[in-house]
Image: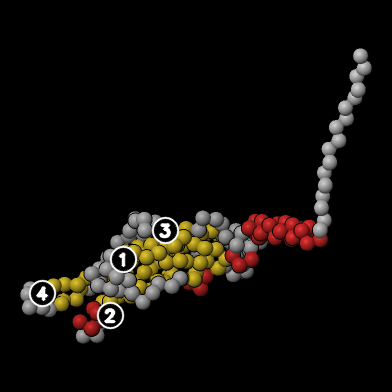
C-alpha cells in the first residue's frame, strides 16, 4: 500500500502493563490522512458518488477497534454535511499496531439537497479492549480528524443508474446491440456477398 500523508492522532491515555521487570506502557493512537477527502466532480441532487477512500493507520502498540463518524468540527464557509449522506464501508473488528487500512466512502445526496458548498469533518476514533480490561473497565482511546468537502450544483444527476456514469450505460447498450445484430445474422443464415467487376477495354493495333 502506498503511504499517504498522515494527520496527528490524539492520544487520550496510556495503560500500564505490569511485569517482573520495569513497567512497560502500551500506547493507544490513530492517524488519518492530512489532506481532506474531496469529491473530484460536482454532485447533483439525488445522485450517488464514490468518494476517495479514507486512509487510517493504527499508530499505537495495541490492536484497536476503529469507529468513523461525520461531524462538523472546523469552522469556515460551507454547509454542514448530514451524516446520513455518507455511507462508511466495513472496517473490521480490529486493526493491528502499525496496520494501514483504506475505508470506502459513498456519498448519496437526496433529491431536495440544496446547491452550494458542503464541508464537515471525518472523525476516526481508535480504542483498545485490552486497555479497558487493564484499567479496571475504563476504555482508553485516541482520535484524529480530517476534512470532507464537495459541491452540489442544480440539475439532474449525471451519475446514472446504480451510481454509474451515464456514458457507461450508453456504451454498454451499444455493445449489447451490436452483439444482438451479429447473433441474428449468424442464426438467420443471412450472407452478404460483395463482388467487384473490373472494366477493361480492348485496344486495336
- The single residue placed furthest to the bottom in the displayed view is 136
Q: CA distance from mark 3 to mark 4?
A: 39 Å
- Asked if residue 97 shows in the view, the reply is yes
Q: Residue visible at 92% across and 17% down?
A: 204
The residue that label 2 is drawn on is 129
Q: Secondary structure at mark 4?
A: loop
Q: Earlier in the sequence, mark 1 or mark 2?
A: 1
User: Which residue is the extreme one toward the top?
Assistant: 205
Residue 77, can we see it? Answer: no
- Left or right of 37, for residue 29: left
Label 3 vs label 4, nearer the camera: 4
Residue projecting furthest to the left:
21
**What crowding class fits label 3: few (fewer than 14 Cα within 10 Å), some (14-19), or many (20 or more)?**
some
Q: Which residue is mark 4?
A: 23
User: Spatial distance from mark 1 to mark 2, Cα to Cα?
Assistant: 17 Å
Q: What residue is disc 3 on?
A: 36
Q: Tell me: 143 left or right of 52.
A: left
Asked whether the residues under the numbered discs 3 and 4 touch, taking CB atoms below 8 Å apart as contact, a structural biologist would say no
Q: Residue 34: image x %, image y %?
A: 36, 57
**Can you tell which quarter of the image residue 140 is in?**
bottom left
Discs 3/1, front = 1
Q: Position of residue 52 (x, y in %)?
A: 46, 60
Amino acid at each position: 500500500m502506498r503511504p499517504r500523508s498522515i494527520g496527528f492522532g490524539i492520544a487520550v491515555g496510556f495503560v500500564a502493563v505490569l511485569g517482573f521487570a520495569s513497567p512497560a506502557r502500551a500506547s493507544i493512537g490513530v492517524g488519518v490522512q492530512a489532506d481532506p477527502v474531496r469529491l473530484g466532480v460536482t454532485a447533483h441532487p439525488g445522485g450517488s458518488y464514490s468518494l476517495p477512500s479514507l486512509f487510517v493507520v493504527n499508530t499505537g502498540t495495541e490492536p484497536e477497534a476503529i469507529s468513523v463518524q461525520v461531524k462538523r468540527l472546523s469552522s469556515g464557509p460551507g454547509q454542514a454535511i448530514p451524516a446520513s449522506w455518507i455511507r462508511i464501508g466495513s472496517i473490521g473488528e480490529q486493526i493491528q499496531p502499525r496496520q494501514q487500512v483504506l475505508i470506502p466512502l459513498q456519498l448519496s445526496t437526496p433529491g431536495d439537497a440544496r446547491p452550494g458548498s458542503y464541508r464537515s469533518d471525518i472523525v476516526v476514533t481508535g480504542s483498545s479492549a485490552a486497555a479497558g480490561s487493564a484499567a479496571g473497565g475504563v476504555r482508553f482511546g485516541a482520535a484524529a480528524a480530517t476534512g470532507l468537502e464537495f459541491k452540489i450544483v442544480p440539475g439532474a444527476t449525471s451519475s446514472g443508474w446504480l451510481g454509474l456514469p451515464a456514458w457507461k450505460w450508453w456504451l454498454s447498450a451499444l455493445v449489447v446491440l451490436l452483439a444482438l445484430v451479429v447473433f441474428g445474422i449468424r442464426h438467420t443464415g443471412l450472407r452478404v456477398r460483395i463482388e467487384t467487376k473490373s472494366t477493361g477495354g480492348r485496344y486495336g493495333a
